[in-house]
Structures are given as C-alpha cells and as structure tokens.
Image (cartoon, rainbow, N blue to C red):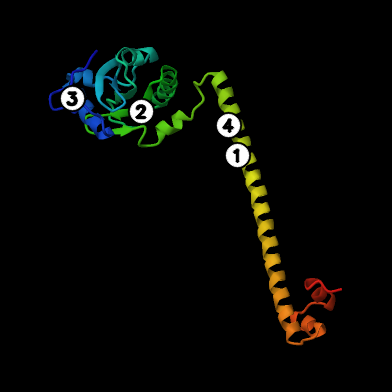
Amino acid sequence: MDIKLAKHDKRYIESTDDVYSIMQRVLLRENKIDQEKEHLWIIGMNQAGYILYIELIALGSYKSVNIEPMNVFRVAVMKNASRVILVHNHPSGSLIPSAADKDITDRLIQVAHILNIELTDHLIITPKTYISFRSIKLMAELEQSLKYVPTYQVVERIRKQEKQIAKEKLAVERDKTKTAQQKAKAEKARREKAESEKKILINALLEKGVSIENIAKILGITVRAVKGIINLK
C-alpha cells in the first residue's frame, strides 16, 4: 500500500531523524487496532535522498510480521530507486532488535546487492522513539555476514582477499629491499665523505711537517691505514 506524504513532511532524507519524523506520523495515523500490530514499510529514494515512495509492505501480528524479500524490492525496481530504508514498529515499545529482525535484514542486504540497490538502514520505531541499525553499528556488522551470500561469491571474496594480501606482502618486501638499498647507499656515501675528509686532514698535517706516525696516533688508526688513505706505499 502506497503511503502519501503530508504537506509538511520533508521530501528529502538527510538523517535518521528525518525518517523517524515522517514514519512516526504515519504510525500515529493508523487506527488504534492497527497500531498494535507490526508494520513493515520501505522508503525508496534516489541517490540524492529524494523520497520516491513509501510503501507498506506487510502488516503482521502484535509481535511479528512476515516478509517476502521480493515484495520489499518490487516497487524499488519499478520506480528505479537506488537506495531504500527499511522501517518497522514494535508495538511492545521495545527497541531491541530481535533475532528475526537481524536475520531478515541480513537476507535483504544480499538481495539488495543482487539488484544493485543500497539498503541504507533499518529503523525500529515506536510512537515515542526509535533506533537505527546503522547508528548502533548493527548494519555494518550484518553487511559483513556471509550467511546469505551465495557460495561462489564467498569463494570469490576469499580469493580476492588472498590476492590483496599477497599484493600487500609483495609491496612490503619491495619496500624492505628499497629501504635496505637506500640505507646501503647512504652508508657508502657517509664512508666516502669521511675518507675524503680524513684525506684532506692528513694532507694538511703532512704539509705542516707532521710525520705519518704521529698522524696515525692523532687519528687513532694504523700507519698502514694512513698510507692507504693518501695512496702511499
């Protein structure tokens, strides 16, 4: 059933508060009997967040509602919605997601992937407040679930991860090699500079008449090393 927006309802979704503000009024418009039943709505949007439709997908009992995944996305496909938000109420007033709430969201995430539609969030609402699966990090957790992912996709995902790990490992090894080469080059340059400075100092001392033996003592090296630096035999 298509839900009509009131004149004062926003047409753009910018936050979960916007979603709740709209859906709270929708829930309160229901008669008392229906308010005591679980409703499941789907909000379809374009990429910019403009609301294309709000559809009541299912009306259940006071504690549960049956959901067929294709019914959730049927209108989304027909109206070219690229993003959808799932909303359902808990007549009990509890905002704790049930195991069934988590399971159907997990399943719908995978159906959305197949249809190339983004399931942005799932809200549980009451007349007074709400919770967002995205806000409490539950959406991110379910997006990592493999429960409803086809086996071939799991295999592909594992192979992709293995390739990425191998690529990263190779990059680390290359960085290590590059770093070692850079260090060796820097050390060689340092030694050459030190030898050059020693040679200049030795020649300066020789010009002042200091013997090679005394130069060796001053520098703390052997006479042979001094001769090697200035190429004397």
> Which sits in the foreground, 10 or 30?
10
User: Percent from the top left, x then y, of residue 30?
Assistant: 18, 20
> Which sits in the foreground, 228 or 64?
228
Left of 141 or right of it: where is 31?
A: left
Residue drawn at (64%, 40%) of the image: 170
Q: Of circles 3 and 4, which is in front?
A: 4
- In space, the residues marked 3 and 4 are separated at their CA atoms by 48 Å
- In space, the residues marked 2 and 3 are separated at their CA atoms by 24 Å
Residue designated by label 4: 161
Name the quadrant containing residue 103.
top left
Q: Which mark is residue 34?
A: none
Residue designated by label 2: 120
Check the image and report above or below for 174 versus 219: above
Name the secondary structure under disc 1: helix
Name the secondary structure under disc 3: helix
Asked if residue 66 shows in the view, the reply is: no
The amino acid pointed to by label 1 is Glu
The amino acid pointed to by label 2 is Thr
Name the secondary structure under disc 4: helix
Residue designated by label 1: 168
The amino acid pointed to by label 3 is Leu
Counting residues from the N terminus, which is met first, the one under dot 4 or under dot 1? 4
Query: Is label 2 in contact with label 3 (beta carbons under 8 Å)?
Result: no
Q: Which mark is residue 28?
A: 3
Name the secondary structure under disc 2: strand
